[in-house]
Structures are given as C-alpha cells and as structure tokens.
Image: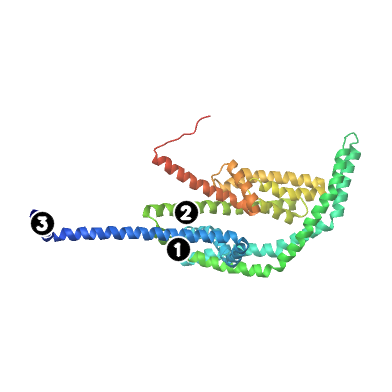
Amino acid sequence: MAKVSESKSHNLSEKEQKKCENPVNERVEETKDQRIQLLANKNYLTISIYALFVIVIGAFIIYMFVNMKQTKTVISNFINNISPFIVALFIAFLINPMIKRLDNFLHHVVKLKSKGLRIFISMLTSYLLVIGGLTITILYVTPQLIQSISDLVSKQSLMRDEVYNFFSGIYEKYPDLNLESVVQYVENMIPDLFIQGTQLLSSMIPKLYLFSVSLIKMFVNILLSIVISCYLILDKKNLKFNAKRIIFSVMSEEKARGFIQTGKECANIFNKFIVGKFIDSLIIGILCFIIMSILRLPYSILISVIVGITNMIPYFGPFIGAIPGIVIYIFINPIQCLIFTVMIFLLQQFDGLYLGPKILGESTGLKPLWIILAITLGGAYAGVVGMFLAVPVVAVITYLMDKVIKKRLDSKNIVLEKSPD
C-alpha cells in the first residue's frame, strides 16, 4: 500500500511539474476546448434558428392555403395599392433605352458636354413622346372605336341581308354549282352568329363608355406612375449600387459578380423583346391604318388597333388580329373581305420576313417550337397577357438552364457536338 501511494504521489508530482513547466500549453489547450464547445453551441443555435424559421414559414403557407379567400383579397388589395409603382417600373423599363439613345445622340452627334442637361433633355423628350401618344389614343382613337362598334351594332340587319344577297347572287349566276347545302348551312349559322356577335358588341359598348368615364382616375394613376418612373430613372445609380451592396453582402465575390451579370442578361432579353415587339406592332398598326385608308376600307381605326395589339403575340397574333376584320367584312361586303384578307396576308409577310427580324433580331434566341409552346401555356394560364409575356419568360428560363448545363458539363470536362443526322 505504501508503494502504491508513493507511486501516485510520484505521478501527481510529475503532472504538477509539467503544469509548472508548460503553463502556456495548458492554457492553449483549455482555450481550444472552450472554442470547440462554443462552436458546437453556435452550430446548435444556428440549426435551431433555421428549424424555427422553416416551421414559421411552413405554418404561414398552410394558413394562406386554408384561408384562400382572405389571402386572395389581401394580395389583390396589396397589388392595387402598389399598382402605380408597378406601372412606374414598367414605364421606366420601357423609356430607359430611349433616354439612353437620346443621351448618346446628344453627346456624340450634338456634342453637348453637360451631362445633367443631356439627361434632362432626353427624359423630357421621351416622356413627351409617351404622353403625346397616350393623349392621342385617349382623345382620338377611343371615340373612334366607340363610334365604329356602335355603327356595327346598328347595321346588323343590313349586314345579314348583304350576306343573303351575296350567296343568292352566286346561286343565280352559277346554277350548275351545288350550293344548296352551303346556303342552307349559312342560313342556319347566320342567326346564331349574329346573336353572338350582337351580344359581344353590345357588351363592349358599355365597357368602352365605362372606360371613358373612368379615364380621370386612370389619368391620375398614369400621372402618378410617370412621376414615380422619373424618380426611378433619376435614382437608378443609387438603386443599382444598393442592390449590388446587398448581393455582395450575402454572396461571395465570384458568385455575386456572376449573379449580377446573369441578371443583366435576363433584363436585356426582356427589354429587347418587349420594346422591340412594341415598336414592331406600332409600325404594323400604323401601316394597316394607312393601307386601309388608301383602299377605302371602312372601320380602319377599329381594325388597325386590333391588328396592332394582337401583333404583340408572336406567331398567333397576326391570325388572331385578322379574324375580327374578316368576320366584319364578310357581313358588310365579301369583296372587301377578300381585299382585307390579301392585305393582311401581305402585311404580315412583310412583318415576318423583313420588319420583325430587323427590329427584334435574335432577341429571345428561342426556336419556333419553344415559342409556340410558351404561347400555348401562357394563353392557357394567363390569357392574352400570358401569351405575350410567356415568350420572354421562357427565353430567360432557357438562358438560365443553358448556363447551368454548360457549367456542369465544363466541370466534368464533357464536350458534346450535334450529330449531322
């Protein structure tokens, strides 16, 4: 027993001697243990915070789905309240390229050195053009549309008699043709078609009048949106700088720069398509009005507006825009219907083969198959607006997917080539 106690005391004395000899190492080991314990506690705290965050978000999403009516009401009210800011963002998005081009023109051609004066002149000119276009549309085009629709409603009986006389005249001139089944089918179809057309036109008239009555409120909202868009354009440098600060604060430098570059490319795709398609459709609508006026076709304003608006939809737009005009003219004068059909066909060929490629170029980079798929899905889920916006949205998604796929293939050192077949 004495030997054991002596050995223990001997061991203790050795440890004490080591502590006395290396007090610094002992403190380092203690601080390391404390750091490890602190890091473990921090990890547990982080995991707990993330778990709590996920639970709260999940509960909020479930609550939104359970109370779907209230959720829709809250979302719609929120969208209505911020609608001037949304419209302002859209206006700034559309006008900013025009301001840039005017600024470059004043700087390089006119040799105007003052940057502030260039920005002021560019913004003033751009907004005057936009406000002038809206004013012309409200004061001139809208009354013409109302007058044309009212005129069509009042002439429905004459239009029906014109169709009957047209087919009767063909039957008298060419009695050998077996047109009895065709005439019978037309006689059965025309009343239903006129009832549907009359209901459609009759419902459009009150809507147009209500639209005219609410023009004051709409005009105030547009003015507010224009003012907000001016501030957005003037303050765009600060907005971009603050956005970059946020991105760089939450991402590494390499990822942040890649994210910003990708965002610029996506915005460029949207900008080129929307602005280019707007200019293209405006030119087509004006050309349609000029040609119809030369050919003395009635309702030129109404049909030109329809053709210009529907031309915003790629591929299907020209066909959708031609249908109302063909239906109207076939009841007024079938010869005019034939002239209008040929005119629209030539106009759309000019747009598809020359004007559209000159203005749009390869703005989306999508193949026709993907464009048709985008328009079909967009129209099914969001109507006409979805048909228009689906193309740039799919173009952006395709661009992002292509970047991800290229990055993954490069990391694996895989190079793929298209087969010749």
| Structural distance between the alpha carbons of marks 1 and 2 | 14 Å
Residue at 73% across / 56% down in the picture?
A: 301
Give, as a three-letter code, the residue at label 3.
Answer: Ser
Q: Mark 1 points at which residue?
A: 237
Give, as a three-letter code, the residue at label 2.
Answer: Lys
Q: Do the residues labelled 1 and 3 touch (CB within 8 Å)?
A: no
Q: Do the residues labelled 1 and 2 touch (CB within 8 Å)?
A: no
With respect to residue 370, does 24 lie above or below? below
Q: Is residue 106 visible?
A: no
Locate residue 266 relative to residue 385 in the image: left or right. Answer: left
Circle nearer the N terminus (1, 3): 3
Q: In which quarter of the image is residue 247?
A: bottom left
Q: Mark 3 points at which residue?
A: 5
Question: Could you say where residue 284 lies in the image, as x and y percent from the top left?
Answer: 66, 51
Question: Could you say where residue 421 lies in the image, as x and y percent from the top left?
Answer: 53, 29
Q: Which of 7 and 330 is in front in this view?
A: 7
Q: Mark 2 points at which residue?
A: 264
Circle nearer the N terminus (3, 2): 3
Label drawn at residue 249: none
Q: What element carries label 2?
A: helix
Question: Could you say where residue 294 lies in the image, as x and y percent from the top left?
Answer: 74, 51
| Structural distance between the alpha carbons of marks 3 and 2 | 79 Å
